[in-house]
Amino acid sequence: METHPQAGALSDESVLVAEAKAGSYAAFEELVNRYEKKIYRLGLNVTGNPEDAEDMLQETFLKAFEHLQDFREDSRFYTWIVRIAINQGLMKLRKRRSSKEVQIEDTSNDDGEVIPRDFADWRPNPEEELERTELEEILQNAARLLPMTFRTVFFLRDVEGLSTEETAEMLNLSEGAVKARLFRARLRLREELSKTLKRG
Amino acid sequence: MNCKDALRQISGYLDGNMDDELKSMLQVHLKCCHHCQIVFDTTKKTIELYCDGKLFPLPNTVRERLHDALRAKWESRSK
């Protein structure tokens, strides 16, 4: 992997951002190196397919490159990048809206109950017992069944580690709506995974 | 606390957003309710699986295409 020759000296992200803004491609590339894996994974999880995830990855960093001077640094660089990525991903999904596999919104009430039905215990270490690609397929199939906003809330909060406030702002939702969707997304994913990951 | 109330609190408990009294009521319930304990454990495991950094790796070819595209953009801007 290509690394910035002064990566040690430029370890602080705000220094990298300042250098990239001043025209250092190496500094910008170091920022890309830090976050490309996470943005690709987010793309796979949000869009559900590798081609869209690659497009989302490229468009995100090309846009970040174009608009770097507009980044006001009142948020983390990563949060800014995720915002761009999410906008790209949502646009991509809206274009495929007619596709049956894309459920954009949940039509039921946010306060509706999610009632667990599967109480079987899971095999203890599915990540060790299953092939990586098999487990990835199971996880992606379960995520695909969630309405897009639920899925996006889950990945932003639980996987990317954004706060409730950041997630709410990014998706134009209230913090209460983020919490309600996260709760339902977690339980629905659990229920779906239970079908394949339970013992026996 | 009954099962319905316990399930409503599981998400907050996972986030660590819960006052001490409610937390201890939930912990007591989980200790004596096998079903709710399983829902809690498997919900936690669900999050852990999706967070597993070994899954969904970035393929080298995808990474190379990204860096080629960025470098081309950079060079066209520098001209």
Image (cartoon, coloured by chain):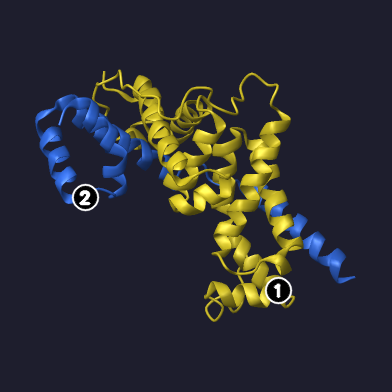
Chain colours: A yellow, B blue
Left or right: residue A22 compared with residue A130: right
For the residue labelled by badge 1, is the local secondary structure a helix, a strand or a loop?
Answer: helix
Q: Give the residue displayed 53% in from the left and 39% down from the top.
A: A152
The kind of residue on which mark 1 rests is Lys
What crowding class fits label 1: few (fewer than 14 Cα within 10 Å), some (14-19), or many (20 or more)? some
Q: Is residue A34 visible?
A: no
Closer to the camera in the image, A59 or B11: B11
Identified at 26% across, 43% down, the residue is: B13
Residue A76 or residue A144, whichever sits in front: A76
Locate the N terminus of chain A by quadrant. bottom right
Query: Taking A76 as reference, is B30 above or below it?
Result: above
Give left or right: position of A120 versus A113: left
Residue A18, image x and y in percent?
A: 65, 77
Checking the image for residue B19, the label placed there is: 2
As drawn, the label of residue A21 is 1
Q: Amino acid at mark 2?
A: Asp
Image check: A37 left or right of A199? right
To which chain does the residue with label 2 belong? B
